[in-house]
Image: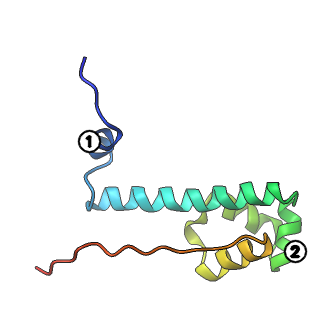
Amino acid sequence: MKTYTLDQVTDEIVGKIGTPNRDQFEYDLQMDSIGNAIKQTRKERNLTQEELGKLIGVQKAQISKLEKNAGNVTLETVIKVFTALKAKVKFQIELTDYQSA
């Protein structure tokens, strides 16, 4: 029986790195991770969605939406949320090799 790595399976099903499908998949995965981090941190701080919303000046529905899909959120909002949760925010940017055509 042949075994496959997660990278091999992802390449086959989603697409190879650098393809539009793979880029979208990676983006969606990152946005899900941000939403999950917000929800987990909020719960660790014993806050309801409504209480967190009040801390940053938005409605409970917006916090719910953010926790489910952070894809349509601004960087400013993410920073406000994590600041209200008393969490440090660090961004890491990696530049890949760029070759012009």
Please provide percent x and percent y for residue 92. Answer: 48, 73
- Quote the CA–CA distance across marks 1 and 2: 45 Å
Badge 1 or badge 2: first in the primary sequence: 1
Asked if residue 20 lies left or right of residue 43, the reply is: left
Question: Is residue 5 placed above or below 33 in the rendered structure?
Answer: above
Asked if residue 14 lies left or right of residue 97, the reply is: right
Q: Which quarter of the figure is the C terminus placed in?
A: bottom left
Question: Is residue 43 placed above or below 2 in the rendered structure?
Answer: below
Please provide percent x and percent y for residue 17. Answer: 27, 57
Residue 42 numbered mark, or none: none
Residue at 55% in and 67% down: 71
The amino acid type of the residue labelled 2 equals Lys
The amino acid type of the residue labelled 1 equals Glu
Residue 12 numbered mark, or none: 1
Label 2 belongs to which residue? Answer: 54
SS type, badge 1: helix
Q: Residues within 10 Å of mark 1 (few under 14, many from 20)?
A: few
